[in-house]
Image: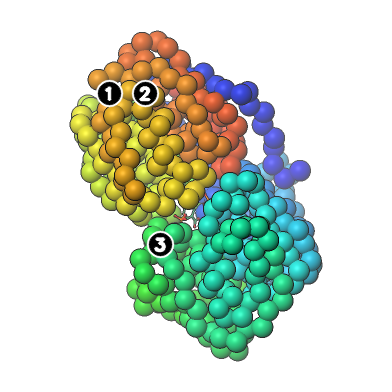
Amino acid sequence: MAQKQKSYPAYINLQPASHMQGTVKLPGSKSISNRTLLLAALANGTTEILDLLASDDTLVMLMALKQLGVTWTQQEGTQNYTVHGCNGRFPTHQADLFMGNAGTAIRPLTAALAAMGGDYTLHGVARMHERPIGDLVDALNAIGTNVIYTGVAGYPPLHIRRGQLHKHAMQVRGNVSSQFLTALLMAAPLMAKHDAITIEVIGELISKPYIEITLNLMQRFGVTVARDGWQSFTVAAGQQYQAPKTIHVEGDASSASYFLAAGAIAGGPVRVEGVGKNSIQGDVRFVEALEQMGATITMGDNWIEASSTGKLKAIDADFNHIPDAAMTIAVAALYADGVSTLRNIASWRVKETDRLSAMATELRKLGATIEEGADYLRITPPAQLQAATIDTYDDHRMAMCFSLATLDGTGLRGAALRINDPKCVAKTFPDYFDVFAQIAAQSVRNS
Ligand SMILES: O=C(O)C1=C[C@@H](OP(=O)(O)O)[C@@H](O)[C@H](O)C1
Ligand SMILES: C=C(OP(=O)(O)O)C(=O)O
């Protein structure tokens, strides 16, 4: 078994806290873990991956690779893995792959399998079958791959057969998910055997910093991508992924956001370890938003710390570059001195749930006044938070960011905050509520 299993009750009651202080060691980055697993599997040679994230999203990738004939081993009692690369061609040409709700698994694997051809099906949980993949499939099939929808057009499940590449210039729309471009980039060396592959982005590209993670990791595996800004990307012919021997997975910057926000809301200092000023993850820029709200941030090579001395200031900003960590700002806005506006976050609607609608509904339960726009959220905090039972919509980030609603020690008047279905955090952070409780306990000891 690759991951430890954790059992959670149907709900969890969190006690109010007025001060948060302590240090957290972060789990590995989901974005880096799943990219590294796929690149290591495709590479020529053996890669040792250190500190891989242990979660549902990485488990589905590990299991899919195993079904595809990739050999990997986990070093006992660690999150270190040895992956034996298959040099651009999976040994197994027929497989039925369960992808859970992991966008970072299904999208890049679809592109890689389409490029290779075979007889593969990819499917996931019910919500996965509502998350769009049409822009990726269109981009692939336009150059000759053979990807078929077996349910509703534009969505998984997918069936991948053998195609015949007849073009090397690809086009992909960028305004629904950056993961489509990431997927094409990662698969491009498999299709660029004799001719360069170019990928042109049509229209706006969202979530840009995730493309930097992709390019950075491809480079670590020896493939260079030439680019013209965010408009077009070229992978020269004849490049193959080469195993870098060892690769270390940074701590997850999106997971860091909950603890850093706790330090900013409730005094701190709260320090996260595993990610720092040289991170390749765009979500470290979450701290800029906290600073704008008045928090004090310090950073080292492998840590970030947040603290504050007074009430947070309201914020009005564009969060397109950090859609995941922006959810944490929505809850932090409950503690601000005025009305906050989170702009350019339409992609929230096609993630684990419709996050714009879910966030609006749950913030209202706490007493906030919310304006939900097509692509923005305006949050007016209540004078005092109300105790509430928070629904989580099978969305790990809904569960994690609403734990911050306990940090107004007096406002909840001693009442616990109830979070339903806390087990959904297993998507990226199975131990989240234990770690959150440890920080709360450290804070009590230190106060
Ligand atoms: O490439 C990645 O690792 C991710 C890209 C983002 O998705 P979108 O590009 O769909 O916004 C982000 O929300 C997701 O959690 C991880
Ligand atoms: C959007 C997310 O996940 P996915 O990788 O499945 O897109 C997320 O983790 O917030």
Reading the image, the residue beneath label 1 is 382
Q: Are marks 2 and 3 in contact (CB under 8 Å)?
A: no
Measured along the vertical axis of the image, is residue 388 above or below residue 202? above
**Amino acid type, label 3:** Asn
Decide which of 94, 244 is in the foreground and name it: 94
Residue corresponding to mark 3: 175
Compare residues 18 and 234 and report the one nearer the observer.
234
Q: Nearer the viewer, residue 164 or 42?
A: 164
Q: Amino acid at mark 1?
A: Pro
Residue 305 quadrant? top left
Q: Are marks 3 and 1 in contact (CB under 8 Å)?
A: no
Residue 288: x and y, percent?
29, 46
- Which quadrant: the C terminus? top left
Residue occupied by mark 2: 366
Colour basis: rainbow
Q: CA distance from mark 2 to mark 1?
A: 8 Å
Q: Is residue 107 visible?
A: no
Drawn side of residue 192 relative to residue 69, left or right: left
Q: Please identify the residue farthest to the bottom as the structure is shown.
A: 194
Residue 384 on image: x %, y %: 29, 18
Query: Residue 54 lies in what quarter of the image?
Result: top right
Decide if residue 126 is on the left or right side of residue 419.
Answer: right
Kindly state the secondary structure of the residue where label 3 is placed: loop
Structural crowding at the residue carrying mark 2, measured as other residues with C-alpha within 10 Å and reported as few (<14), some (14–19) or many (≥20): many
Image quarter in which the N terminus is found: top right
